[in-house]
Image (cartoon, coloured by chain):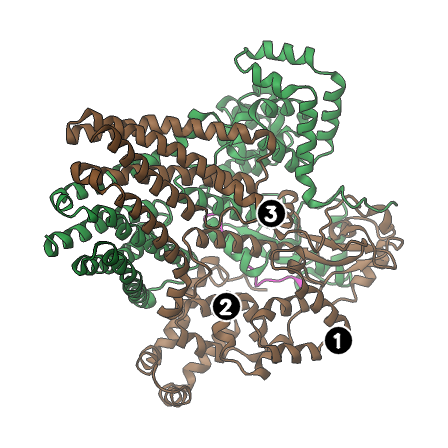
Chain colours: A brown, B green
Amino acid sequence: MTDIPHDTQHTDNLPQHLLQVQHLLEKHALVEVVAHNQELPRSDRHALLDTLLHKQHLAQLRQKLEDLHPADIAYILEALPIEQRLLVWELVKAERDGEILIEVSDAVRESLIATMSRDELVEATEQLDTDEIADLAPDLPHNVMRDVFKSLSIEEREQLRSAMSYPEDSVGALMDFSMVHVREDVSLEVVSRYLRRFDELPDHTDQVFVVDRDDHFKGVLPINLIVVNEPDTIVGTLMKTETIQLHPDDKADQAAQAFERYDLVSAPVVDEDGKLVGRVTVNVVLDFIREESDTDLLNQAGLREEEDIFASVWKSAQNRWAWLALNLCTAFFASRVIGGFEDTIEKFVALAALMPIVAGIAGNSANQTTTIIIRSLALGQITQANARRLILKELAISGLNGVVWGGIAGLFAYFLYHSIALGVVMTSAMVLNLCVGALVGLAIPLLLEKLGRDPAIGASVMITAITDSGGFFIFLGLATIFLI
Amino acid sequence: MTDIPHDTQHTDNLPQHLLQVQHLLEKHALVEVVAHNQELPRSDRHALLDTLLHKQHLAQLRQKLEDLHPADIAYILEALPIEQRLLVWELVKAERDGEILIEVSDAVRESLIATMSRDELVEATEQLDTDEIADLAPDLPHNVMRDVFKSLSIEEREQLRSAMSYPEDSVGALMDFSMVHVREDVSLEVVSRYLRRFDELPDHTDQVFVVDRDDHFKGVLPINLIVVNEPDTIVGTLMKTETIQLHPDDKADQAAQAFERYDLVSAPVVDEDGKLVGRVTVNVVLDFIREESDTDLLNQAGLREEEDIFASVWKSAQNRWAWLALNLCTAFFASRVIGGFEDTIEKFVALAALMPIVAGIAGNSANQTTTIIIRSLALGQITQANARRLILKELAISGLNGVVWGGIAGLFAYFLYHSIALGVVMTSAMVLNLCVGALVGLAIPLLLEKLGRDPAIGASVMITAITDSGGFFIFLGLATIFLI
């Protein structure tokens, strides 16, 4: 046996693969060919490529791709501009298409599926498990799904139907069906003999599930216990019955929390009759958590969905428009609030320069409050008993912030415009608007949660809308009363 | 064997535990006692509690806590106000203190450790592995760490020293030392006999590591293969040599990506001489990913760190001040930009009402661009070859947004103030400021990345500062030239 060369398996070596693939693509001046020929019909472009490319380089590239893990190919596909991406996609062996489609992001998957024929798509699903087919299903054309369905066994059809019937954020959608089950009255010896009939156990099999003859879930038997105990031990005496059970209708969130809390590798999914219907594994949970947190970050910036960085300008713009349109509406409203005080501003033009300060600080402070509340809601830390306490606390912080930062802003206004009254109006407006911000920052996520909506979505637009308009109204209103 | 009652192990049952604990606490009118006596010195409060509480209820609560998983107790502690939290903490059996301290959030851990004596703390660490002690170490007083260190064996001291020597975001900090290793020239029979000497294998042992007599890493042997193969097979013929190897100095990020990509449960950590020094397991990676994404969300709202929702007003305010101070500075700057155009505003007061629209939309659009870029940087999708393409694309989107939304805003201004010139100035200012936003939104994360900083931190403050001041300057500047 030879020692493993240090770099070939090193993790930060992955961008290296991407560079090598890009290098090979550039060697054929492919980048230029592609750039100059985007207008050509597809078939002409192919002809052109074929004449321009050295067959040998293509073979080299194909070889390189063959050595890579499907997840790495997915990564390379995501990081390549669309034309290069499709070229690499064609070089990938057809029997690997399915596992790669599972790995790529939604946006990129769409671009790949669009280039594949019905037969190619059906063939691609043939190497996949039913739970993986269910993941792909929303992106596949109807006629492809019909063909796929026909090619499955009755049991697989049942699994596919069940996997597709659960909403995206439920345990049912995370579940797979490749589990190993045994009876409780057999010995470890028998279990071992049974397991030896597998060439390899399903991935993430850290435990086998113990069921009765009607598939009712009885408990779990960790593989580790099979290994450390004597072969004549009976399963029933070793199995753990006090174990986490998930239900297909549970929220995926809750399953993820259970995996985090109890450090699980796999967990049984049991239906309402107590029958074992599937299992959830930690790799799926890991992907789910990553996706959730990505979605949170994207939503905070008002992006509806993950964006293929090489998508067309038109497509990307559409992804961003809903939010900008909403923002424009709230900005128009705030603008009309200011418009209502034009007489005041005309008499005391300094107000125009100072009003964004009042609006801005309160907006930021309110977003801090909301972030804390959304986080506490997600962790389940807010109860009826402590809600009042939290509200008082956030108001107190805002009052404190108002005195400190409002005081500074008031001094700033006084020194610039030599008006004590203006300074006092500035400070008062900041204190008031910070308190408005705190109330809104508390109320919006709590209200969204009560309505059964995701408290994070859209909270920040609504908050900024209120602290902006509110800030302008309070500041200019106070100024109209006390300065004019 | 009895069937497992359906609800006792149901996952969404966890808040139930919290409610039960809170109910038990309320039964003794503890909430009121605590609320009314926060001013009392600690010892008096205790005396009061003792007389008011029925011993029996406390026993009931203690029993309830004993049945719970440490992670669940941690969750309950986090969701209780500080006084109730400390009462529950005292009821927890001393020998569970260590594992619970590991589970709670940093902010809550601090509040618990503050109440513990030196001896209690030393005792708490006694049940922990060295990698867990290393996680607690930053929060423990120096004299406690000295005592802990003295109580360890030489091997454990070495492990603790090594675990504490790696920076927080490195693989070394995620690593644990509880791994099982075997030689490559033995049979599975021998391995099984060796494993049976353990009562239970370390958590997340999905594979044992194969090393030579000098601890050089040779490969891994999945437990599953031990189970499915005949006992006389030799380890060397079964073990996998093409496997992911982490290095203690690798970035934790990269390890997390490897776990996600290759669906790992555990991975060996190997030093530069090729010696096996530890392993990383998926549960630690899961916690790391969750923490990272929490930190991202908190940083986006300008919160320096995780906040105990029951921390004092004063402590919470401090957590939020750095950001508000920074925002006040940029707001003052923007205010001075407006101040420079006071003459213009005095002549055409509508400008004051319209200028926040120009600034706001560009800020939002720029934050969308930055989010996309930060994400692509994190996924390693941005290379020298495609950077220019991305810049052109973002500029094109901004141009398109400028024409569409700037056009609408221009019409809005025209209809309100019946001035074509004003409408044109409005539209032009929006187009220009959206392009400024796109450039800034691209440049700031790319620059931060080049400087080796986290591209997400502070990006949004800087961007808003520039799109605000820039928007006011462009809009009022164009108005001064063309309208006055």
For disc 3, the chain is B
Q: Are marks 1 and 2 on the same chain?
A: yes
- Whether B151 is drawn above or below A309: the answer is above
Q: Which residues are magenta?
A: B238-249
Distance of mark 2 from mark 3, alpha carbons?
A: 25 Å
Residue at x 48%, y 42% (from the top left corner): A444
Q: Earlier in the sequence, mark 1 or mark 2?
A: 2
Where is residue B418, by image quadrant? bottom left
Q: Which residue is mark 3?
A: B283
As for residue B243 lying within the magenta part, the answer is yes
Marks 2 & 3, CB-CB < 8 Å contact = no
Mark seen at residue A153: 1
| Left-right relation of B108 to A125 | left
> Mark 2 Cα within 10 Å, few/some/many (few <14, many 20+)?
many
Task: Look at the image and tell me whether residue B274 can be seen.
Answer: no
Q: Which residue is mark 2?
A: A74
Distance of mark 1 from mark 2, alpha carbons?
A: 29 Å
| Left-right relation of A227 to B252 | right
As for residue A238 lying within the magenta part, the answer is no
Q: Position of residue A321 (x, y in %)?
A: 39, 61
For disc 1, the chain is A
Q: Amino acid at mark 3?
A: Asn
- Residue sitting nearer the eye, A396 or A226: A396
